[in-house]
Image (cartoon, helix red, strand yellow):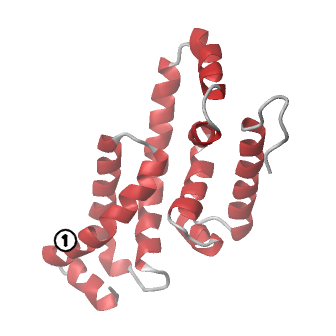
Amino acid sequence: MTGPFFNCIAAGDASALSRLYRRYHRRLARFLNRLTWKNELIDEIVNDTFMIVWQKAGDFRGDSNVSTWIIGIAYRPALRALRDQRRSEFELLDVDHVDSMVQYWHDHELSDLLSKALDLLPAKQRLVMALAYVLGHSVEEISQITECPVTTVKARMHQVSCKLRETTEVPGKAKCI
C-alpha cells in the first residue's frame, strides 16, 4: 500500500479505504486495547482515526511505514481519550477504598500486578510502552508517531522501567530487574 493506493482514497474511493481498514484495524485495536479495555472507546478512536485517514490520505508521502502513519494519526485521539477517561475515573474514585485496592494488587501474581502498574502510568508513558512492546515499533518509529525526539522516547521508556521496578517490588523479596 503506497502512494497510488492513498491517491485512490484521497480521490474518494471508499473501497480502497475499506481495504486499508480491514488490513490495519486489528493492529490498531490491539494497540488501543493495551491502553483501555473499554471496547466502545476503542471503536470510537479507531473510527476517528480512519476518518482522519480518509481526509488526509493525500498527505501520505511514504516517509514512514503505513502502520506508523496510521498509529501516528491515532496517537492524538487516543491520548485525549485516555486523559478524559482518567479524569472521569479519578472523579469516581473513593478514597476510602484505596487501601483495599493496594492490598488487592499485592495479593495477585506479578503479571497481574504488572498489568495494573502499567494501567496507572501517565497516558504518554503507557502509549510509548504499548507502541514498543505491544506493536513492536522501534524507538525511531515511536519518535515519528509521537512527534517527540528519540531522546524523549528513551527517557519515557526509562522512567516506566523505574516506575515498574518500584511498583512490582514485594517487601522482603529481591528487587525485580
The spot of residue 128 in percent (x, y) is 59, 57
Q: Residues within 10 Å of mark 1 (few under 14, many from 20)?
A: few
Q: Residue at x 77, y 36 (%)?
A: 169
Against 91, residue 64 (above or below) is: below
In this rendering, would 121 be left or right of 58? Answer: right
In this rendering, would 95 be left or right of 5? Answer: right
The spot of residue 138 in percent (x, y) is 61, 73
Q: From the viewer's side, name the closer residue of 56 and 154.
A: 154
In this rendering, would 83 be left or right of 101? Answer: left
Against 158, residue 107 (above or below) is: above
Against 100, residue 139 (above or below) is: below
The spot of residue 135 in percent (x, y) is 50, 65
Q: Is residue 77 visible?
A: no
Q: From the viewer's side, name the closer residue of 171 and 83.
A: 171
Q: From the viewer's side, name the closer residue of 42 and 13.
A: 42
Q: Is residue 57 visible?
A: yes
Which quadrant would the N terminus be assigned to in this image?
Answer: bottom left
Q: At label 1, which amino acid type do we have? A: Ser
Residue 171: quarter of image = top right
Q: Residue at x 22, y 78 (%)?
A: 9
The spot of residue 73 in percent (x, y) is 42, 64
Against 63, residue 172 (above or below) is: above
Looking at this view, name the residue that lies furthest to the bottom.
Answer: 4
Q: Residue at x 41, y 57 (%)?
A: 30
Residue highlighted by disc 1:
18
Q: Residue at x 35, y 48 (%)?
A: 42
Secondary structure under the numbered disc 1 in the rendered image: helix
